[in-house]
Each structure stands twice: as C-alpha cells, then as structure tokens.
Image (cartoon, rainbow, N blue to C red):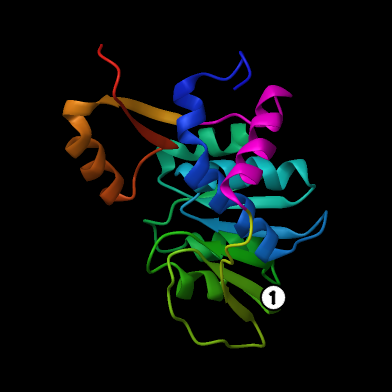
Amino acid sequence: MPDSISFTQGAAIPVAGKTALESLRTLDLKPGNTLFVAGASGAIGTIVIQLAKNRGIRVIGSASSKNHPHLLSLGAEKAVDYSIAEWKDQIKQWMPEGVEAALAIHRGTSKDSMDIVKAGGKVVTVSGDKVDSEREIKVEQMQHQLSIQEAVNMLIQDMVEKKLHLVIEHVYSFEQALDALEKTETGHARGKLVVSMEEA
C-alpha cells in the first residue's frame, strides 16, 4: 500500500470501489453523456460521481438536501432531494428529454430512475431490482467482471494522483460493529463506514 494511503482507506476500497467501476463499465457512457445516480451520497455513489466526472460524464445525484453541497464538491453538476415530490421535475428542467442513463444503487429506485431516462437510454441496477423496460430503455443488472485486485489497484492509483477522494463517514470500533451495520441498513450513510479491529 502506498504511504499516502492509510490502512483504513485501503480496507474501505474493495467492495464499493469494485462496484462503482463495474457499474460504470456496464453503463458504457461517453464524455458529455448525462448520468443520474440514485442514492449518490453513499459509498458507491460518491466514487461513481468522481470517476464519471474524470471521464467527462455529467452527473446529477439524488440525496437528502443536507448532502447536496457534498455531492457538488465531488463533481456532480446538480443534486435533487428524493424526499420531495417534484424532484423528477427538477431533473427534467435540467435535461428536458431526460438523461442518457441512470444508476439505481438502492433497492426500489429503478422504477423512479426509468422515469427520468430518455427514450432509448439505459438503467443499470446494483440492487437487483426487477423493472420492465419501456420506451426502448435498456435495463441491465451491474455485471461482475473486474477482479478485486485489479479494481483496488486502479482506485489506489487514482487516490495517489489525487483524482479520487475516498469518503469515509465514520470509523467504528469492533465493539460498535452492530451500530455500523444498523447505520448501513438505513441507506443514509455518507460515503463508507469502516469497522476497525485496532484498539482506540
């Protein structure tokens, strides 16, 4: 591990980082394309935003309003609050025909994502949501292709070169592992949660 990357950061990379890379590979977007990320403030979403921006992809993400400045600081062009009724209208004001693609990270977000993707676009689901295609929108499950080591190496290099900031919301002690699990299950974490075996 490079000296500039801590053990905690290294431990936080593999699962979310690999999922983010594979999601973008499945989306197969080009520079200038637009991407909606449902659940953008979590571990996967915060990495996807940065990787997408680095590739010239324009990103809009959904999150609670308190996390909007954070999403914008990572490279999202716009953020919407999924808890208000008019969030889809706000996206349509930004992109009247809809976005090229959407990444539905959390369970239950695929159908809403379909509503703001343009005809002939793509929705990639991470959670395994089942949703019927409409308006010639292609619906795909994220594909597992990269090895963990390949993904980690790619992301560590980006971190060393300051192209990627790994967001860690909180480091829990081993005794607090159940608290970390409960926080994860809420779907409201900002970035990654880590459980450390080290003594405080």
Numbered range of the magenta stretch: 147-167
The residue depicted at 59 percent of the width and 71 percent of the height is 123
The residue depicted at 70 percent of the width and 30 percent of the height is 157
According to the image, label 1 marks what residue? 121
Q: Quadrant of residue 89?
A: bottom right
Q: List x then y, in percent, for residue 153.
A: 66, 36
Work out whether residue 76 can be spotted: no
The residue under label 1 is which amino acid type?
Answer: Gly
- Left or right of 50, for residue 39: left
Residue sticking out furthest to the right: 31
Residue 129 versus residue 183 in the image, above or below: below
Secondary structure of the residue carrying tag 1 is strand
Q: Main secondary structure of the magenta part?
A: helix
Q: List x then y, in percent, for residue 17.
A: 56, 44
Q: Confirm whether the magenta stretch covers residue 169.
A: no
Work out whether residue 39 can be spotted: yes
